[in-house]
Amino acid sequence: MIVNCVAYQEGRKLGDIKTTDIADYVNQPDCFVWVALCDPEPEEFESFREVFSLHELAVEDALHGQQRPKVEEYGAALFAFMRLLEVKGDEICEGEVAVFAGPDYVLSVRNHTRQGFHDVRARCEREPHLLKQGPSFVLYALMDAIVDRYFPVIDALEAELEVVEEQIFVKEAARSNIERLYQLKRKAMIVKHAVTPLAEATVHLFGGRVPALCANTQEYFRDVYDHLHRIEMSVDTIRETIITAIQVNLSIVAIDEGEVHKALAAWAAIFAVATVLAGIWGMNFEHMPELDWRLGYPVALGMMGAACGGLYYRFRKAGWL
């Protein structure tokens, strides 16, 4: 589906145009066309592939999706593939954005997401002095918007982690805490898989040898990289905290189990003494003088009680009971 098809010249909007008129505008000096698509069909995409001379491998990646975030150079054109992230309920929903940028065109394609870029287009049109840089500034604006949308996801993960951390020392919540921590770890990995490859690719858009298309906008892509680096550090911090929380939670569970084992061992030792004494006097040998005592039975019970009581006192004092 075509969302927008707009022509710009020297940083100012000429107006919405028909797709059949694109060729007339891209041939004009200091003019480029920005087309936005949403979940396009292959047949719909074919016409843009021809008019913009898009590379077939880049087109395949844009249509099929499921790609690692990247920025690739095809002659004078660039192809960028990025992931959109959005928190919905307890889940992180993923979308995909592919951007084709050439000297006289920008083609943005978003799939599996309802997040639009009307605010990005409005921002570019409010800054004609920057939009004069052409498609490279549009590419920067799109990347910057996508990266900025990662920050609320990071905030949501940090808030959820704080809630779990408050329950770490609640014994009744041990199992649920571990489950929630593993879910958080999975979400953090989703963010990392979206951020880290994109940061690696963005490095090639500023400093050293950069694509000719980005020659005048290097500092803007450096700003995008700075944001990505901050997000990457936040994700690493969250992952480390999650791992530490899991270890603490498991340690608490192990300590609780150790307390139970100590109590069981203490009671087993107490009853073992009584069992030994009862076993000795239950052998019924002929020459056991204490069996003929009138007070033998109460004395035996007293000895058992005293031995068990002494052990109970010692275990209680040691904190086992």
Image (tube, grey):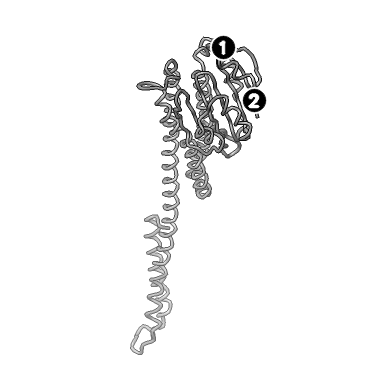
Q: Amino acid at mark 2?
A: Val
**Disc nearest the viewer among 1 and 2:** 1
Residue at the image point whose x is 54% and y is 10% from the top: 10
Q: Secondary structure at mark 2?
A: strand
Q: Nearer the viewer, residue 221 or 267?
A: 221
Question: Mark 2 Cα within 10 Å, few/some/many (few <14, many 20+)?
Answer: few
**Above/below status of 266 relative to 290:** above
Residue annotated with mark 1: 9
Q: Secondary structure at mark 1?
A: strand
Examine the rendering and report whether any part of residue 161 can be seen: no
Splitting the image into 4 quarters, where does residue 1 fall? Answer: top right
Residue annotated with mark 2: 3
**Above/below status of 308 relative to 126:** below
List x then y, in percent, for residue 266: 40, 63
Examine the rendering and report whether any part of residue 211 can be seen: yes
Among numbered discs 1 and 2, the one appearing first in the sequence: 2
| Disc sitting over residue 126 in the figure | none
Q: Amino acid at mark 1?
A: Gln
